[in-house]
Image: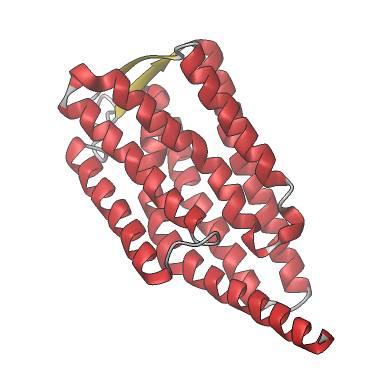
Amino acid sequence: MFNGRSKLFCFTPQVMLITFTIEFTLALVAFVRYKLSQKTIICILTLVGLGIFQLAEYRICLAPGSGMFWAYVGFVAISLLPAFGLDFITLADHDRKRWVPVGYALSAGVIFYMFYFSAIKAAVCGGNYVIFSMNHGFYTEFALYYLGLLCLGLVLALRDMMRARKFGDRIKVQLYFWILVGYFSFLLPTGIIYLLSSQSFMGTASVMCGFAIVFSFILFFKIIPILMIVLSHHAHYRHTRKSALV
């Protein structure tokens, strides 16, 4: 992964294109298998958002002249991802839904700031990952927003997993366990890369979303199927309760 000058060799344009293809394929299969509903759309949009960022990176490397356009497209996509995360974490627990509007409001604010102040100054393909140059104020605010919502998602998932374990709800325990595994699958490697390579600082978004392919697989093969079971149990419970009242 590293040579003598600490350069990454795991996020080439070819890998970006393959990752985009995989994530969009997973989104399409999820759409066909589970159909588009209020419950599944967030999970599918998460896969689409990850794929769009990979496509944006690939286009930046392929056609540098259109780099700024694709930089904004990519950052709009990933700016929504933490809010999407809060949304599908709380799908199984309506008591936590109050955090969802907060997440979307913050993401909307970040996107508005990004465009209004032209916060992204340059996007350069480094060969191994894309380097985004942003004004210092925006970089700090974006990092606080992004990591803040990710940490909030981790806290909510951990608390709900402990709560489900207390009540003996094994399905929900599995759901929140895999959500936690999914989050750590890209946060931990990104943190390690950040510590090992000083050159990766400006490419953090690119590196994180590169590792997020692991999260995409976990989302598709574990989180979505288990979430469907949880939601079907909720629907059955509401139907049973309604029948009892009649």
Q: In which quadrant will I find the C terminus? A: bottom right
Residue 132 position in % (x across, y down): 37, 21
Q: Nearer the viewer, residue 32 or 11?
A: 32
Residue 29 position in % (x across, y down): 32, 64
Q: Quadrant of residue 69?
A: top left
Q: Nearer the viewer, residue 202 or 243?
A: 243
Residue in the image at 53% along x and 22% along y: 112
Q: Is residue 61 above or below residue 191?
A: above
Q: Quadrant of residue 129?
A: top left
Residue in the image at 60% along x and 51% along y: 87
Drawn side of residue 98 relative to residue 230, left or right: right
Q: Is residue 18 above or below residue 148?
A: below
Q: Nearer the viewer, residue 236 or 7?
A: 236
Residue 56 position in % (x across, y down): 29, 33
Asked if residue 211 shows in the view, the reply is no
Coloring scheme used: secondary structure
Asked if residue 80 shows in the view, the reply is yes
Residue in the image at 32% along x and 59% along y: 28
